[in-house]
Image (cartoon, grey):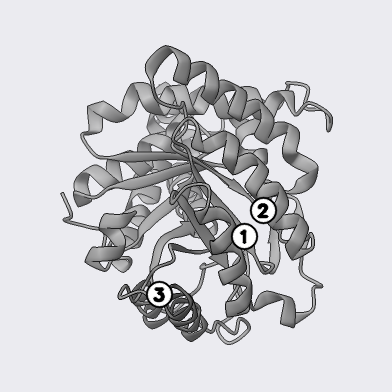
Amino acid sequence: MEHARENGYAIPAFNVTSSSTVIAALEGARDSKAPVILQVSQGGAAFFGGKGLKNSAEKQEASVAGATAAAHYVRAIAPAYGVPVIMHSDHCAKKLLPWFDGMLDADEKYFKEHGEPLFSSHMLDLSEESKEENIEICAKYFTRMAKIDLWLEMEIGITGGEEDGVDNTGVDNNSLYTQPEDIWDIYKALSAISPMFSIAAGFGNVHGVYKPGNVKLRPELLEKHQAYAKEQLKSDNNKPVFLVFHGGSGSTKDEITQAVKAGVVKMNIDTDTQWGYMIGFRDYFKKNAGYLETQVGNPDGADKPNKKYYDPRVWCRKGEETMKARVQEGLKDLLTENRL
């Protein structure tokens, strides 16, 4: 993160829900010669583990198992792609803390055996709680995380829209914009524990994708956050805070560039890569519809087999190829490509 901040780029974080989406992201990073962040949401982790698994509110069994499995899989396969990979968990609201606890248990177990945590970082999203409770809970968990060298990402200011079952479409617009004083209060509390944290500050961000003009991003607010923190610290560093950009789907290139200049070191990309993954399947099925109606019989003849068309390795690969293209676009937009 320090290298990104000092060299004027951000690392995109791509949500992954399967080994196939992991491969698409890793392949894109490899071919763009770039570091990458792979992250699982609570719902995405449950999908990774299998929708048939129990996932109670009290224990989050499927989400814990799926996130742990995803992290182990990424650790096993990433070295083959030869790029730096950060393994991260996405938004964890207060009601999902059993999921967070389960992942930290896995981190601590791995740390005892290998001297490093299973994940690289985790995110706590307590933006729906009061600022005081948000900071209190983050500090409690961060104290535990710091002992095993885990990075914490936290959120202050609500990200609008809807994603992964969290619906903030009706929130007051004022809640979408974080104030500099809030950032400073968080910085003071967390920096006393460890420097390994970042803040997802609201500047009008909205999850999902919307028509141009419907989302009012104000990336200039991020510059104000940095200036205020610099003043309080009496520092020469113009970007003392590691900032994170959520809800960036549909953002203009200029908005992304301005955010990076203001010290954003990580940007989440999920909605656009979901679309990118899907269009590979869509286009393949449309193009080959006549070969996918039956196992035998197609436009080439009533006795012609169709196995080579419905083999999952064929059509699933098409989704990987189109998602990979969107991954590489994100790496280019955030100035991450050719950093290796």
Circle 3 packing at 10 Å, graded few (<14), some (14-19), many (20+), is some
Which three-letter amino acid code belongs to the residue tagged 3? Ile
Q: In the drawing, what numbered circle is on residue 155?
A: 1
Q: Are marks 1 and 3 in contact (CB under 8 Å)?
A: no
In which image quadrant can residue 51 be found?
Answer: top right
Circle 1 packing at 10 Å, graded few (<14), some (14-19), many (20+), is many
Location of residue 42 with respect to 93 vertically, above or below: above
* In-front residue for pair 284/39: 39
Among the two numbered marks 1 and 3 on one chain, the one whose residue lies closer to the N terminus: 1
Q: Nearer the viewer, mark 1 or mark 3?
A: 1
Q: Position of residue 108 (x, y in %)?
A: 54, 22
Which three-letter amino acid code belongs to the residue tagged 2? Asp
Q: Are marks 2 and 1 in contact (CB under 8 Å)?
A: yes
> At numbered mark 2, what does the secondary structure look like: helix, strand or loop?
loop
Residue for badge 3: 256
Q: Are marks 2 and 3 in contact (CB under 8 Å)?
A: no
Circle 2 packing at 10 Å, graded few (<14), some (14-19), many (20+), is many
Residue at image point 61% right, 39% down: 44
Q: Position of residue 310 (x, y in %)?
A: 47, 28
Which three-letter amino acid code belongs to the residue tagged 1? Glu
> At numbered mark 1, what does the secondary structure look like: helix, strand or loop?
strand
As drawn, the residue found furthest toward the top would be 113
* Residue 242 appears left or right of 200: left
Q: Position of residue 259 (x, y in %)?
A: 41, 75
* In-front residue for pair 306/114: 114
In which image quadrant can residue 253 be found?
Answer: bottom left
In which image quadrant can residue 236 be found?
Answer: bottom left
Q: Position of residue 239 (x, y in %)?
A: 37, 72
* Residue 81 appears left or right of 128: left
Residue for badge 2: 125
The residues bearing labels 2 and 1 have C-alpha atoms spaced at a distance of 5 Å
The residues bearing labels 1 and 3 have C-alpha atoms spaced at a distance of 19 Å
